[in-house]
Image (cartoon, rainbow, N blue to C red):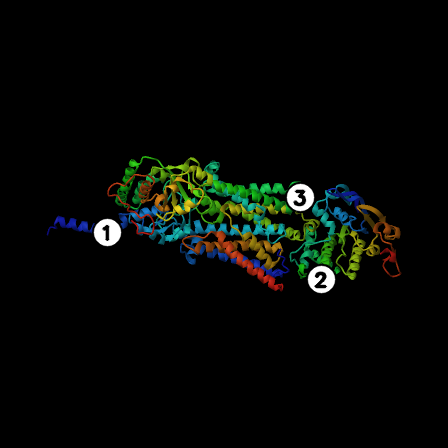
């Protein structure tokens, strides 16, 4: 009896399919399932892509979403622990540019662990690139594109606000008030980039670069229109800021333009940062409004449920 | 000043037994140290790997590339710090002396911090040429430069007295602290973090290539310290008495200083600041077996290696997968232990 | 022979010794006396380079002291200082054995050990051998140090080589018995061939054992010669401002008689 040709094809296909299904490694030779992350923004991206189950260890700066803090800890981003990382049996190390120390990263590479450390140019306008890169490494490129499209809304909202803005307010970013003199952001800082992106002028940038303490007289001379402080999001810190002689007499305090933002929300260069900058732009410019149907969707702190 | 009237173990044969015991303990702790860590490796696996394991397994890499260099560095640094401490305590004729007193460690700190903070500006060529070796080299050079300065200052009139050494050291310490303060002020956020971590001490991340120069320097210095045992004993009688007995006292002090500088430089350059070992270990060993350096020196060398290895095991395993700074552990171990020894000695004297 | 000429020692603007002079042959015990501040200890320290000379020349065996290697000199010269600041718990045996340091190359180890034993026996401290130095009384400490110093010279004495013993106030903490014992020992060492220079406070002791005496006053040598010649009434009145006289009874060592009116 002649065998029907379509049935042999069918059997062949089924068998091939079985072989294929039973041998998944043949398809996904670069599917990383045990990832150690060094750098809060990368952890956030992986959570936003929905791939958090593949993370086995994080560094101490991975604070958002709050579930991330329950993962195994491998140390501070600039000082991760080599055997700690290895004890988690990872197949990939992803790190922000300042992951370190260099000799530990080198040791991990020598042992044969795949590592990808993102480059120095990790700034506000490169967030989408970072997301694409992570998505590509994790083999979820479509999800990456979806996430980038999602945050386009925030980018457009920011552009909308900037088009309405008529002035360029003088903004000062204060990191902390506790240790004696207030620590403020000069040029070459993430805060400087964020202020600029929000359409403001970083008044401290003309004087120094990096994070530096500000003396009383210099602060009075600077007289910012807006002060941004780091702290619990939304909670007004203007009472503390109003007390110290540096800012007591400033425009910002007089006009009640002292804003409090959560650090990792505004400066983390994560998927939430475009929204954060949009929120900042709305706050520092007067007479501007969000586009229709735009609302803040991402959580500003780690207390609420993640995106 | 802590003047002890009697050592715990006065008899020579008992002292020799103790030194042998320390040697055995050293080996055992070395083996244990290799077997413990974040990655699970059983003792039988360890023996295999040390003799002829397959070159491609993760365990083999962990032992040969991570734990073994770290163990050798830890033991060498512990030995070097303790031997230098013993030499300084002899030269100052004071069991409370420490190489930090005369500014040696601050020189290394200055070199390291200068490299960290100025590595992108003034010292950028240095930093780029040496890459990951830049900070250790900076620390070593800093230590040597500062020590040369102290040496020069104390050698005025070829005297090299203890007072001049102390005064030069205190002055240098103050000046170096000021420089470190300035560097800290101008440092960026990242550099500030880095120099803070350096200050807390760490034994991590060093390959065989990195540790070999330090191992060689420390070994040679420890050998010289051991050779100095008899003259150091006589020096403890008194400076004039030692001179009359034929010891070249000025040369002895200079040698002790130079070997201490080299030892501390070679250690601190790779590990950052690890305190207490140089002070506690020789002090405890002296309480146990008396001031005779023919036993005290080898006992300090072995004791230092053991103490730092124990501290490192704790640092690596207490809060896995994170790691504690080694300096915290040495203080936490050394301090209370020293207190117990002190109390016991005062009790035996009837206080 | 030890020869010191034109010795001047200055500290700042103070002159401690002015043109002092001393010559001691091997086999003789030479004592240096004088009131407080006369410069006795300074002279001894000058002889062993513990203080720098402003001017002057010191020779051992006609060789200038500065031309000697430290070990060379230590093989034939031992110094017993007045103070010891050793607060480390070495045993008595360990301290005496420290004198072996310069002899290690030339003298076999067993020989050195027997010298240590001999020194301990001579100073009557053998039973203290395993005791910690810091637990001893003042007098015992001084005798142990003397034992160490004696042990340093025993090899030279045994080989009949010229050697020198410098002692600074060896009787300060000793009881009456041990004072005379120690000075007799110094005398014996001199008889064995060493040149011994001792700084002593007690005039009677000096008179009992010295071959010759140098008397210092305010940094200058005011008298030099035999005890009986030097320690006369006129000199004692002049230098010590005391009316006293040396007297010697049969079968007794010399003693000092001090007049009632002197006090």
Q: Position of residue B117 (x, y in %)?
A: 47, 40
The alpha-carbon separation of the residues under discs 2 and 1 comes to 93 Å
- Please identify, in this view, whether the residue under mark 3 or under mark 2 is nearer the observer: 3
Residue at image mark 3: B159
Farthest-out residue, left: A1
Q: Tell me if residue A108 can be seen.
A: no
Callout 3 and callout 2 share a chain: no
Chain under callout 1: A
- The picture quadrant where one finds residue A285 is top left
The disc at residue B222 is none
**Residue B276, relative to residue B173: is it above or below?**
below
The answer to whether B286 appears left or right of C206 in the picture is left
- The picture quadrant where one finds residue A286 is top left
Q: Tell me if residue B79 can be seen.
A: yes
Q: Position of residue B330 (x, y in %)?
A: 51, 54
Residue at 82% x, 46% y is C221
Residue at image mark 1: A21
Chain under callout 2: C
Residue at image mark 2: C126
The answer to whether B283 appears left or right of A182 in the picture is right
Q: Quadrant of the C terminus of chain B?
A: bottom right
Q: Position of residue C15 (x, y in %)?
A: 77, 43
The answer to whether B240 appears left or right of B133 in the picture is right
Please tell me which residue lies in front, B91 or A143: A143
Q: Secondary structure at mark 3?
A: loop
Chain under callout 3: B
The alpha-carbon separation of the residues under discs 3 and 1 comes to 85 Å
- The picture quadrant where one finds residue B168 is top right
Q: Secondary structure at mark 2?
A: helix
Callout 2 and callout 1 share a chain: no
- Tell me whether circle 2 and circle 1 mark residues in contact (CB < 8 Å): no
The alpha-carbon separation of the residues under discs 3 and 2 comes to 38 Å
């Amino acid at each position: 009896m002649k065998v029907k040709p379509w049935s042999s094809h069918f059997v062949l296909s089924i068998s091939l399919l079985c072989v294929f299904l039973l041998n998944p490694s043949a398809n996904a030779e670069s599917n990383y399932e045990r990832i150690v992350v060094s750098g809060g923004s990368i952890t956030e991206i992986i959570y936003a892509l929905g791939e958090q189950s593949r993370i086995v260890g994080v560094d101490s700066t991975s604070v958002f979403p709050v579930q991330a803090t329950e993962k195994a800890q491998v140390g501070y981003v600039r000082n991760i622990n080599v055997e700690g990382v290895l004890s988690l049996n990872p197949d990939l190390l992803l790190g922000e540019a300042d992951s370190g120390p260099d000799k530990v990263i080198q040791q991990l590479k020598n042992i044969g662990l795949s590592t990808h450390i993102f480059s120095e140019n990790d700034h506000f306008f490169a967030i989408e690139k970072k997301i694409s890169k992570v998505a590509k490494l994790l083999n979820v490129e479509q999800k990456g594109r979806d996430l980038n499209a999602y945050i386009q809304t925030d980018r457009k909202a920011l552009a909308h606000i900037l088009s309405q803005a008529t002035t360029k307010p003088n903004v000062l970013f204060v990191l902390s008030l506790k240790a004696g003199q207030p620590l403020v952001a000069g040029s070459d800082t993430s805060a400087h980039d964020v202020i600029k992106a929000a359409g403001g002028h970083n008044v401290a940038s003309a004087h120094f670069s990096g994070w530096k303490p500000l003396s009383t007289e210099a602060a009075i001379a600077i007289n910012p229109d807006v002060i941004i402080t780091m702290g619990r999001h939304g909670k007004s810190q203007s009472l503390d800021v109003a007390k110290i002689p540096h800012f007591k007499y400033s425009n910002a305090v007089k006009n009640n333009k002292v804003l409090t933002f959560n650090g990792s929300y505004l400066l983390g260069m994560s998927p939430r940062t475009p929204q954060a900058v949009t929120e900042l732009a709305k706050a520092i410019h007067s007479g501007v409004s969000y586009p229709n149907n735009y609302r803040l969707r991402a959580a500003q702190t780690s207390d609420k449920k993640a995106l | 000043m802590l003047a002890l009237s009697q050592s715990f173990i006065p008899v020579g044969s008992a002292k020799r037994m103790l030194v042998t015991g320390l040697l055995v303990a050293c080996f055992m702790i070395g083996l244990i140290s290799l077997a413990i860590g974040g990655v699970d490796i059983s003792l039988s696996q360890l023996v295999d790997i040390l003799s002829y394991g397959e070159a491609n397994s993760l365990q083999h890499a962990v032992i040969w590339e991570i734990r073994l260099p770290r163990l050798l560095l830890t033991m060498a640094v512990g030995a070097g710090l303790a031997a230098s401490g013993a030499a300084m305590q002899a030269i100052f004729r004071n069991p409370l002396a420490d190489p930090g007193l005369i500014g040696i460690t601050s020189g290394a700190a200055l070199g390291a911090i200068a490299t960290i903070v100025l590595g992108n500006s003034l010292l950028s060529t240095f930093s780029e040429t040496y890459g990951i070796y830049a900070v250790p080299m900076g620390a070593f050079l800093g230590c040597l430069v500062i020590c040369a300065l102290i040496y020069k200052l104390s050698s005025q009139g070829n005297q090299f007295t203890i007072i001049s050494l102390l005064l030069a050291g205190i002055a240098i310490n103050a000046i170096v602290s000021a420089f470190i303060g300035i560097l800290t002020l101008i440092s960026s956020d990242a550099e500030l973090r880095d120099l803070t971590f350096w200050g807390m001490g760490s034994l991590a991340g060093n390959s065989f290539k990195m540790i070999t120069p330090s191992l060689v320097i420390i070994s040679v210095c420890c050998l010289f310290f051991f050779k100095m045992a008899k003259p150091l004993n006589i020096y403890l009688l008194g400076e004039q008495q030692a001179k009359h007995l034929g010891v070249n006292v000025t040369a002895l002090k200079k040698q002790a200083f130079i070997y201490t500088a080299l030892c501390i430089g070679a250690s601190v350059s790779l590990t950052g600041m690890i305190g207490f070992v140089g002070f506690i270990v020789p002090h405890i060993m002296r309480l146990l077996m008396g001031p005779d350096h023919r036993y005290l020196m080898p006992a300090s060398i072995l004791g230092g290696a053991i103490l730092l290895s124990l501290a490192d095991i704790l640092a690596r395993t207490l809060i896995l997968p994170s790691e504690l700074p080694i300096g915290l552990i040495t203080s936490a171990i050394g301090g209370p232990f020293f207190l117990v020894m002190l109390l016991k000695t005062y009790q035996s004297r009837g206080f | 022979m030890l020869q010191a000429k034109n010795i001047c020692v200055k500290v700042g603007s103070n002159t401690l010794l002015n043109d002092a002079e001393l010559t001691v042959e091997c086999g003789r015990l030479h004592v240096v006396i004088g009131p407080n501040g006369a410069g006795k200890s300074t002279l001894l320290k000058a002889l062993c380079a513990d203080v720098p000379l402003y001017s002057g020349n010191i020779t051992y065996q006609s060789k200038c002291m500065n031309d000697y290697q430290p070990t060379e000199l230590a093989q034939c010269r031992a110094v017993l200082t007045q103070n010891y600041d050793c607060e480390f718990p070495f045993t008595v045996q360990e301290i005496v054995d420290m004198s072996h340091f310069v002899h290690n190359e030339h003298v076999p180890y067993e020989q050195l050990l027997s010298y240590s034993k001999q020194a301990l026996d001579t100073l009557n401290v053998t039973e203290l051998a395993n005791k910690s130095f810091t637990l001893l009384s003042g007098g015992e400490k001084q005798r142990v140090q003397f034992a160490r110093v004696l042990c340093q010279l025993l090899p030279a004495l045994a080989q009949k080589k010229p050697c020198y013993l410098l002692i600074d106030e060896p009787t300060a903490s000793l009881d009456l018995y041990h004072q005379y014992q120690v000075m007799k020992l110094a005398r014996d060492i001199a008889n064995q061939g060493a040149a011994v220079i001792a700084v002593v406070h007690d005039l009677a002791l000096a008179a009992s054992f010295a071959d010759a005496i140098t008397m210092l006053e305010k940094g200058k040598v005011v008298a030099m010669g035999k005890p009986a010649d030097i320690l006369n009434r006129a000199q004692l009145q002049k230098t010590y401002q005391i009316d006293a006289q040396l007297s010697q009874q049969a079968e007794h060592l010399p003693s000092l008689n001090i007049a009632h009116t002197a006090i």
